[in-house]
Amino acid sequence: MTIIKKVNKPPLIIPLRLGFFLAKRQIIRGNIWTTILIIMVMSLTFINLIFIGGILTGIIESSSVSNRQLYSGDVIISALSKKPYIENSPAVISMVKALPWTEAVSYRFVSSGVIEANYKNKTDLSELSEEAGGLVAGIDPEVEDAVTGLAGKIIEGKYLDSDDTEFILVGADKFFKYTPIDTPSMQNLKNTGVGDKVRVSVAGRTKEFTIKGIVRSKVGEVDNRIFMISSSLRDMAGRSDNSVNEIILKLKDGADPAVAQSALLAAGAGKWGKVQTWEESQPKFLKDIKGTFTILGDIVGSIGLVVASITIFIVIFINAITRRKFIGIMKGIGINSFAIEFSYVLQSLFYAGIGTAVGLSILFFALVPYFVSHPVNFPFSDGVLAVTWKGALIRAAFLMTASLIAGYIPAKLVIRQNTLDAILGR
Amino acid sequence: MIIVENLVKKFKTGDSELIALKGVSFKVAEGQFLAITGKSGSGKSTLLYQMGALDFPTNGSVYIDGKDIVKMGNRERTELRLMELGYVFQDYALLPELTAVENVMAPLMMQGAPKKQARMISEESLRKVGLEHKLYNKPSQLSGGEQQRVSIARAIGHNPKIIFADEPTANLDSETSKIVLDIFLGLHKKGQTIVMVTHESEYAVLAERIIRLSDGEIISDEKNKQ
């Protein structure tokens, strides 16, 4: 018989190799349904680790995206503080159009105004009219739609045509029906809708319009506005110059807004208006909520990681406890603790690894696409599942580390028990 | 050479104390086939576990080749079990996910044998116990007798100094028991030291020497006259 005692090998390699040998066979030849169940638990644990945080971030993320798409574009130029409009607007628009990354440009003439409804039905002169204040934006309907896709956000009625001098679009926040808030600081129209005649007052002049459509985008800057064609607003405001208040730049796919911003500033646009990327132009509350939700997401994620660790611990502990006798046998025949522990750590990493891979697949190939096509209807955004590969992989790495520890500890606990008691099952 | 010196083992069961071994002493010469027999509860298995470094006695010493294994730490005892001792258990104690050959390979690999060499030795061991046709069967695909033979193949695979067998025939029918004991007798003829615990006197008499225990004490220690 071949005697193999006292073979000189690096001591660590031997238990590692045997641990791998044992783990591989325990996984392959163990009960397939148990393996599937454990992997399923791991997958759900991983999804749970990401899902809530992803939804929280997604609410704000989609709000940011909508704000970018419908209001600011990729880069927005607005009037400098203390200036009523962007000075030298035609020159600035030319600069914007001359950029190599520009896909489309829109410009808005904006003024504050008041919309008044049901004034014809008033029988008592002392009675207050049904009215709401807000910003009135003069737009070129075709150009605006090309840049922001505003036409797609009409929920009632129709979008403006270029010659609709007698018609307006009104943001949904101006209607009690869509925004049921009625406070002294936020007045809205209660019994008015598409096809009704309203009076719009701008710069002391009042004109009657017909509501052609209602816009609802869940972007405050849009849903609070009244839109009319630019010439109508200019007539009312008594403005004959070509100055505008907002220039919206949509960039070609892949172009960097910061690069476009720098180019515009270098060309001197900063002298005439405030040049901001879409991120810089976001309302402060959105940035604050984003920060808060990120913290909440991290807290939920941390709790998820603890839950995941406990789950793995329980799974591996039950696995080790049910195999206590065999662990005892292995120790009894001289297999050292490290080899056995390593085999359990490998199994735990296998379950966590496959579970994570399945979880990643479910996330990126099922849940994310599902939420893109069926966003959750939140008041200020259409919530999607905001998950990035980088973020998911970082969490996967955390989960694997937790699995390593959570797999090692229960194996260690079982292995520490008396060998003979384990073999005899007492 | 095994020297058992004044071995005492006490178990605590609640408030009471059970003395399983009451100062047992004897020696086992190299190459001897010793059968330890006695009624159920006589302390024979407890004695085997103390001798085989699977348990710690309350008092006394067990010397294997001059080293007191009672004073060894866990790591040293594991090393001793791996390198010098072989075990055959009553319920075979095989790892269910490993095939027959892999069960034999595991301790060999722990000794540092490359996988290929461990497989070769394991196949050779299994051939010796007549299982060359069941190398790749899992324990669940083997009969009780076949499982016990795998257990023996595992015990002899690394050429241990001593084989400890705890009731190796308890779960087997008489025909299969005979096969198992024939294997032990064959190993003994080649000089293998074997310590076997059995409550079946018809098998104990096959050993070279028989120690009878009763209530944790040796009541007879005799050479087999057969």
Image (cartoon, helix red, strand yellow):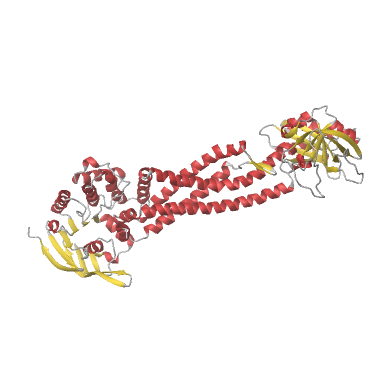
Quarter occupied by the C terminus of chain A: bottom left
Between residue A119 and residue A329, name the one nearer to us.
A119
Residue A201 percent location from the top left of the image:
88, 39
Q: From where the camera sits, is residue B11 visible?
A: yes
Which quadrant of the figure has residue A80? top right
Above or below residue A63? Residue A150 is: above
Residue drawn 52% across the image and 46% down it: A46
Q: From where the camera sits, is residue B66 visible?
A: no
Q: Is residue A202 left or right of residue B214?
A: right
Counting labels gives 0
Which quadrant of the figure has residue A63? top right
Q: Is residue A393 left or right of residue A154?
A: left
Between residue A195 and residue B122, name the one nearer to us.
A195
Between residue A113 and residue B74, name the one nearer to us.
A113
Residue B188 percent location from the top left of the image:
15, 54
Residue A403 percent location from the top left of the image:
47, 51
Residue furthest out toward the left: B225
Residue A367 percent location from the top left of the image:
56, 40
Residue furthest out toward the front: A123
Q: Is residue A395 left or right of residue A409?
A: right
Residue drawn 15% across the image and 68% down it: B219
Above or below residue A73? Residue A21 is: below
